[in-house]
Amino acid sequence: MPILPERKESPYMGVSGVGGGVGSNLIAAAAPDPTYVDDVFSADIYLGNGGLQQMNNGIDLAGEGGLVWFKRRSSGDAHALFDSERGTDYMMKSNDNSGQSTVTSWNVQFNSNGWQVNTSDGQVNDNQSTYVAWTFRKHKGFFDIVKYTGNGVNGRAIPHQLGVRPGMIIIKRYNGGNEDWVVFHKGAGNGTYGNAGTYHLILNEANTRSTGQTIFNDTAPTADEFTVGSENKVNAVSSEYVAYLFADGSEAAAKIFGKDKDQAIVSCEPYEGSGSNQSPIDANNSKDIGFEPQFSIIKSADGGSSWRMACSAMQYGRLWGGNNLNQTSNTMADALTVNADTNAAEGGGSRFTTYGKGFLMWFESGGSVNNQSETFCPLAIRMRDGLVGKPDLDASKYASAVEGDSTAPCFPHDFEVDMGIAKSQGSGNWLLGFRKSYMFKANMNDTTAPSPEPSMNFNGSSASGGPVFNKSYFNDSYGTSWISYAFRRGPGFDVQIYGGNGTNNQPKQHSLGVVPEIIAYRRWSSTEDWTVYNSRANGGVNAIQQSIQFNTNDGEFGFDTSGGQGGPTATTFYPGSHDRTGSSTHTYVALLWASVAGVSKIDQYTGTAATHNVSLGFAPKFIWIKRTDTSANWIVMSEAQGWSSSGNDTIGEFNNSNQFASNKNPVNPTATGFDVVGTDGDWNADGGTYLYYAHG
């Protein structure tokens, strides 16, 4: 019987509206338009319905090919992996060594904008069970899939089309016999890429790395091929194999993504566990992998720990409110994780979160992510930050203002919310919460310490019955008397949490990718004012030396949020030692905004006491205004509150809990900006200086 060479043909697969499968799985040359992380990766949580389940995440699996990895969160069940090379009638489990199973009755389809299933099977869509699904699309510099037939030859070279050397390869024999999943990882080679081919890991086990010349022939992969030995796990005669290849993001050939086509979106950079049960301000607890991740698989090469899988959709570690760092582990709830090597339900056990450059260990001495002196081998996919997040012509995909709709989650934002602000249009506090917090809120209109707010849930619940919030965030049934402003991290907005160390100029990385124009600081462990830096303060000269506040009507006052460093950069902001921004033993949140052309704009105007126009380049749907040269109320307006060019508007004020004021007419939206109207000092005093944030 002839031995077939490795191949990447397109098997028949169910694709919506198409009789066959992907016409070709060859990865095309880079398109003239930029490719963003949103184009090739998505983490989606959902509630099973026992029938047709469609996930429209915008990823073209039908045309480009890829992998979808499912895991039931609410109870123990096997992982389920489907890819375009084997066909969507066939499923594999990462947590055991069995071959593929035929699951035609599940009706799995790869579509041009995501995927769908039509089944009640517990692995992917049991009614009222909760799930996560990770989608990886094939693309040079990111991810490739190779299918090949074994020939038993030691040292066999198998070509791939990743266009860069892999940082991680996962190989599975899927027919011809049960065999373990074998993993190559660049970090397994004791810091030397060339040595990594001497070692391998097993995905379906929690073992340490092993040696064996017959796995990878002691040969590290290259930008064109990877090498296998004669071992049955990787190259038995006539057996069929599939290999999932992830790029080494440190290589120049992987830095092809984002608006300038110069960024990597995948990292396999190893790090050393510190075993430090210390606070996040300990430098050893920051694990720099090059960017902030939204998805990760982490495995120790030296310890018998599980393969920890986490993502921001499920939630990494979440900051508790009202507790300072002296309360150690009581300042953060564990990351919500599943293990690639077991069928266990979602759980905790790893207290770590993310920051602008990687992973941040938070009083975590082990947890399968930070054990002392062990080498950890992560696979990380980049957050949709300001450099690699996809610019969307529809600005409402990144931020929006909506009324409640009386159905939990009651605010129908059309995106995964990372920060939300909720307020009754009657009297009541402005409630602010964020995805990196554990169901706590702070009032924007006062200095009280953050307190529990179970409704601010962000991903809902992983328990059976959910609810699951892949959009919106507020688990209540408030109606139209409530208003919500919400933001998604990406171009124009970021959220960072950190511990203060009591010194000035504390460097903290962010993920905006550009210089922040507004940074709002709030101590999360105790009472404090909201302190707001803006780049236009003091006429733009030494702006860092002046601040305003959300919770008062004060104008600019002399306060340097950095303690003397100067303004933020495109990668870093610098909290000072003051209680407002970075005192020792306290925890903080920083909210960062920047303008995005055609989507949002931060600037200031000068009042004239007469009608005048402010140009934005787009039609605004909501606007925040604050006079900064003297005391004046914040002005908060949106279409959801009835803001229109006809006047008679309803306005809110961040600095108080009053009922929204009606029949006001501060500014009127136009097709390209807004007109400032009247003579009121809160928005148009002659010679007054007004900061604004406008969003389309």
Image (spheres, rainbow, N blue to C red):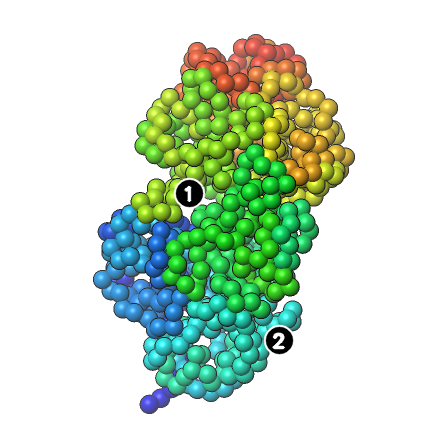
Q: Is residue 322 above or below residue 558?
A: below
Spot occupied by residue 412 in the image (x, y as percentages of width and height): 37, 34
Furthest toward the bottom, the residue is 1
Give residue 341's quadrant in the image. bottom left
In the picture of the structure, the residue carrying the numbered disc 2 is: 195
At x 35%, y 62%, the residue is: 78
Residue at image location 43% in from the left, 68% down from the top: 204
Instruction: Give the structural element (helix, strand or loop) at label 1.
Output: loop
Q: Quadrant of residue 91?
A: bottom left
Q: Residues within 10 Å of mark 2 (few under 14, many from 20)?
A: some
* In the image: residue 44, left or right of residue 122: right
| Circles 2 and 1 in contact, beta carbons < 8 Å | no
Report the amino acid beneath label 2: Asn
User: Is 593 rendered above or below residue 185?
Assistant: above
Q: Residue at x 69, y 35 (%)?
A: 583
Query: In screen coordinates, is 582 left or right of 524?
Result: right
Residue 367: x and y in percent read 54, 57
Q: Amino acid at mark 1?
A: Asn
Quadrant of image for the N terminus: bottom left
- Residue 436's spot in the image, x, y percent? 52, 42
Give the alpha-carbon distance from disc 2 to disc 1, as whole Å: 41 Å
Residue 402 lies left or right of residue 534; in this view the side is left
Q: Toward the viewer: 315 or 85?
A: 315
| Label whose residue precedes the other's in the sequence (2 or 1) | 2
Q: Is residue 471 above or below residue 603?
A: below
Give me the disc on residue 459. Answer: 1
Rendered residue at 53%/81% (across/down)? 212
Q: Nearer the viewer, mark 2 or mark 1?
A: 1
Secondary structure beneath label 2: helix
Of 499 and 246, the residue lying toward us: 499
Few, some or many C-alpha atoms within 10 Å of disc 1 (few <14, some 14-19, many ≥20)? many
Question: Residue 133, percent across and down?
Answer: 39, 54
